[in-house]
Image: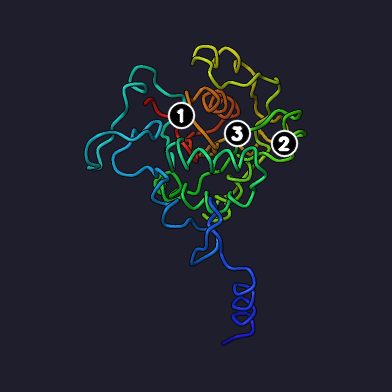
Amino acid sequence: MTLRARIQTAVSLVYPARCLNCGGLVESDFGLCSACWRDTSFISGLVCDSCGAPLPGEADDQIVQCDACLRTPREWSQGRAALLYGGQGRRLVLALKHGDRTDLARPASSWMARAAPDLLADKPLVVPVPLHWTRLLRRRYNQSALLAQALAAREGCDCCPDALVRVTKTPMLEGRSREERMMLLDEAIRPNPRMTSRLDGQRVLLVDDVMTSGSTLSACARACVAAGAAKVSVLVLARVTAA
């Protein structure tokens, strides 16, 4: 046994691996226990090609879209999500977003990568959804940037955390209609003037923690296209779906 292996064994005896969600013992670091894994709704099978929402039926390599995306086409080309925003999934997202659980970004990025191999195959430029500077100052970190950086490092992609800027401090969007969200976000997100050359001609993968109506991602996609992006796709950790 190498010295490194001995050290790792000793550390695991003193600090055994714990479930990311409940704190119970698990076999390896950055994992979920069997109960938490079972209660976390990972998205698999047939999904909407535009927003990643799960759909009834069997996946057969055909491109399908949900009713919402058929009614209102998205401003990006493809979208995927790793899990449903509910139950354990919601708790994990809120722990990352508001609970200072920045350690969740690494395992969450692996779930996201597993949900979107097709979006990552061409090594896109990974760009997070930005926070307004006042919110970033209060929270101390941008959870979307943590996810984007972890994902890019895992997949060998370039990441540009400050490609976009949120120039307007918008109110909380939770509970608002899609129309209200779109109005509030109009012109709120723009390309960073110092980073437009990074976006020009690039295939961009936008990363966020949660997609509800998609209004924020639409604003980001428009900003990327305005800066010359050749293609924009989106990948989120969790997807809100209608009950």
Circles 3 and 1, Cβ within 8 Å, touching? The answer is: no
Residue drawn at (47%, 46%), measured in percent from left and top?
Answer: 112
Q: Is residue 71 left or right of residue 5?
A: left
Quarter of the figure with residue 160: top right
Q: Percent position (x, y) of residue 54?
A: 33, 35
Nearest the camera: 32 or 63? 32
Amino acid of disc 1: Trp
Q: Identify whether 88 is placed above or below 103.
A: above
Nearest the camera: 43 or 166? 43
Earlier sequence position, callout 3 versus callout 1: 1
Circles 2 and 1, Cβ within 8 Å, touching? The answer is: no
Which numbered mark, 2 or 1, is in the foreground of this view? Answer: 2
Task: Give the total number of marks visible in the rendering.
Answer: 3
Quadrant of the snapshot with the C terminus: top left
Earlier sequence position, callout 3 versus callout 2: 3
| Residue ID for mark 3 | 129
| Residue ID for mark 1 | 76
Per the rendering, the mark at residue 139 is 2
Earlier sequence position, callout 2 versus callout 1: 1
SS at mark 3 in the image: loop
Q: Percent position (x, y) of residue 187?
A: 63, 17
Amino acid of disc 3: Val
SS at mark 2 in the image: helix
Distance between the Cα atoms at labels 2 and 1?
28 Å
